[in-house]
Image (cartoon, rainbow, N blue to C red):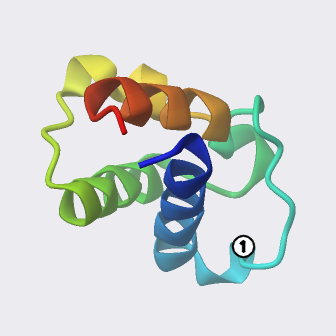
């Protein structure tokens, strides 16, 4: 997948967790919990959604790399290059 495709997948996953976010701009380098009312349960749902969508194992030690759009795209691109 390309970085743009990963970005769309991350956004879709966010919208599944928090449908009220759809249509809101996502600042690529700002943590999700700082941009939105996104608590720890929302974040864990987001991680589970990414796992379901990608089939990738997402170990807890890597969660900090999944807290912004930019870092999540970079992480996923690294885990599964195009």
Question: In which quarter of the view is residue 50 placed?
Answer: bottom left
Residue 13, above or below 70: below
Query: In the image, 52: left or right of 50?
Result: left
Observer-nearest of 34 and 8: 8
Query: What residue do we see at 43% from left, 49% from top?
Result: 43
Query: In the image, 66: left or right of 7?
Result: left
Query: What residue do we see at 65% from left, 32% from top?
Result: 70
Q: Residue furthest front?
A: 82
Query: What residue do we see at 36% from left, 23% from top?
Result: 78
Where the C terminus falls, by quadrant? top left
Observer-nearest of 21 and 80: 80
Residue 41, above or below 68: below
* Residue 4, horizontal then vertical, whole percent: 62, 50
Residue 7, above or below 70: below
Question: In which quarter of the view is residue 24 placed?
Answer: bottom right
* Residue 35, horizontal then vertical, whole percent: 79, 47
Graded by Cα atoms within 10 Å as few (under 14), some (14 to 19) or many (20 or more), the crowding at tag 1 reads: some
Image mark count: 1
Observer-nearest of 44 and 66: 66
* Residue 72, horizontal then vertical, whole percent: 50, 35
User: What residue does disc 1 label?
Assistant: 21
Query: What residue do we see at 69% from left, 58% from top?
Result: 37
Q: Is mark 1 on a helix, strand or loop?
A: helix
Observer-nearest of 63 and 9: 9
Residue 20, above or below 14: below
């Amino acid at each position: 997948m390309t970085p743009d495709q990963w970005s769309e997948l991350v956004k879709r996953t966010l919208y599944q967790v928090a449908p009220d976010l759809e249509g809101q701009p996502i600042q690529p380098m700002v943590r999700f919990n700082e941009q939105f009312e996104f608590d720890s349960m929302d974040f864990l749902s987001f991680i589970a959604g990414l796992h379901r969508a990608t089939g990738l194992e997402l170990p807890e030690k890597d969660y900090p790399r999944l807290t912004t759009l930019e870092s999540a795209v970079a992480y996923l691109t690294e885990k599964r290059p195009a």
